[in-house]
Image (cartoon, rainbow, N blue to C red):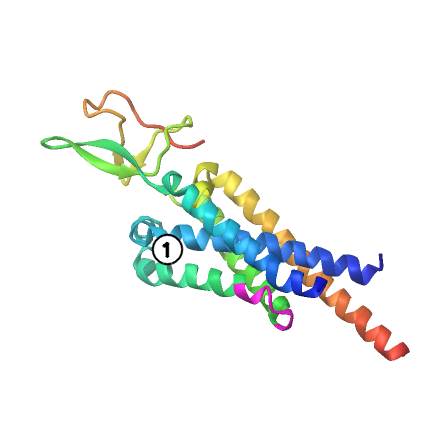
Amino acid sequence: MKSNFLKLVLPAFAILLAVGLAFATEESNLPYVGYIATQSGYAEIQTDCPNLGEGYCYEGLDQVFNDSGLTDPKRTWD
Amino acid sequence: MSRKGIYSKLITLFSLLLTILFMYTAVSKLNHLDLFQWRLERMPYISSYASLISWAVPFLELVIAGLLWFTRYRTLALYASLVLLGSFTTYIIVVLKYSDSIPCSCGGVISALGWKDHILLNISFMVLALLGIIWSKKQYNIQATQKSVQ
């Protein structure tokens, strides 16, 4: 009985918990919107910088901003 | 409680935690596979293998999470966990040390941690896998000793 519990219920619980958590936190996995300077003005891009830290956010060589006016630099995570 | 019993329970607990980690990250990746591939394409050194890695990593994670619950394959799964987590941690450390562009940190809510916390989380799970391997061997040795005494 106890052996069956460990063999069946525990892994089933772990799998259900993990799958549930994955869907519940789905939104935190999505990228953020940012803006970079282009020759014609600006372009909207997707970025992973959450704007939490001190460092400036870059996509390749382009600095990423929070606004389309390119005045508010987006920050990294630490 | 006998030593064998404690080791067995701890190994089950570690398997449970590793299963939750691997299932969570695999489902998060598969849920947004295009996004995961997009992120891999922007990663230094591995961008040319993005397509292969985007399928292989979640597949491996699901296989390891499954194998952890078969007593026969548990040690193998613990070794595989250690190798997978070790490879990822080594890659992050190399990127942080030698690459100019530090890319995203991927994988569900774990992405909110940042790279340094991500490394700490990975190392913690690597320690669990390593202890699982050591204690599996100890458990096996205790069983072998008991059999030889009988």
Which of the chains bears the disc numbered 1? B
Residue B141 visible in the picture? yes
Magenta stretch bounds: B66-72
Quarter where residue A42 is shown = top left
**Please, is residue B73 above or below residue A14 in the view?**
below
Instruction: Tell me the residue at 42%/32% (across/down).
Output: A77
Residue extending furthest toward the left = A40
Instruction: Tell me the residue at 29%/50% (across/down).
Output: B38
Residue extending furthest toward the right = B149
Please state which amino acid type lies under the numbered disc 1.
Answer: Leu
Q: Which residue is mark 1?
A: B30
Instruction: Tell me the residue at 56%/54% (across/down).
Output: A13
Quadrant holding the N terminus of chain B: bottom right
- Is residue A70 inside the magenta stretch? no
The reply, left or right, for residue B64 in relation to residue A49 is: right
A73 or B134, nearer to the observer: B134
**Please, is residue B73 above or below residue B126 in the view?**
below
**Mark 1 secondary-structure assignment:** helix
Residue B90 visible in the picture? no
